[in-house]
Image: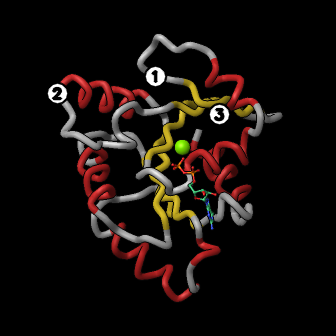
Amino acid sequence: KSGFISIIGRPNVGKSTYLNRVIGQKIAIMSDKPQTTRNKVQGVLTLNDAQMIFIDTPGIHKPKHKLGDFMMKVAQNTLKGVDLVLFMINAEEGFGRGDEFIIEKLKTITTPVFLVINKIDQIHPDELMPLIETYSSKLQFKEVVPISALQGNNVDTLLNQIKEFL
Ligand code: GDP
Ligand code: MG
């Protein structure tokens, strides 16, 4: 089993922390390579029975400016070309305009999307359901996985769910 996975989410939701946790030092090695292709490999995780290639989606993480048509096309093609999108959100901050922007882009593709709710160590368990309901009312997710990338909670569960999907 192998597949391409894109992690998208607002700045500071914990994307790098998650990648570092699952891939460790290999990330630095990968991201030091000059990448001329539009799909930048952020890291490769090789397990006994599966390989996961994590791909950056340029332009969609930090839409500081209104993206030009070209950048938008690049981002959408990247999302179309992967096997799975991990849409990571920050449980502590909840829904915001950055998420709205990303959800609008995700609506234009048919690639399956997991909702990854990160930083659950920062919230009360009672706050989880309302968060899930808010996001699920805006987009349909194949899986909803609460994790703490920093502390490691549920990170293995998420990997298994990704693996089953490839
Ligand atoms: P990125 O911009 O999405 O790549 O986010 P980073 O991985 O750089 O993380 C942003 C900040 O959030 C850093 O200070 C991380 O240590 C912190 N962070 C990431 N994951 C967690 C988490 O699960 N719990 C907590 N409490 N902090 C986290
Ligand atoms: Mg980062």
- Give the percent coordinates (x, y) of residue 43: 64, 30
Name the residue at 42% across, 33% down.
57
Q: Is mark 3 within 8 Å of ligand 1?
A: no
Is tag 1's residue or tag 2's residue first in the polypeptide sequence?
Answer: 1
Mark 1, other Cα within 10 Å: few <14 / some 14–19 / many ≥20: many
Q: Disc 2 designates what residue?
A: 69
Q: Nearer the viewer, mark 1 or mark 3?
A: 1
Regarding ligand 2, which quadrant of the image does it lie in? top right
Tell me which amino acid carries mark 3.
Met
Contact, mark 3 vs mark 2 (Cβ under 8 Å): no
- Residues 7 and 166: in front is 7
- Give the percent coordinates (x, y) of residue 61: 39, 43
Mark 3, other Cα within 10 Å: few <14 / some 14–19 / many ≥20: many
Q: Disc 1 designates what residue?
A: 39
Name the residue at 26% across, 51% down.
101
- Residues 65 and 57: in front is 65
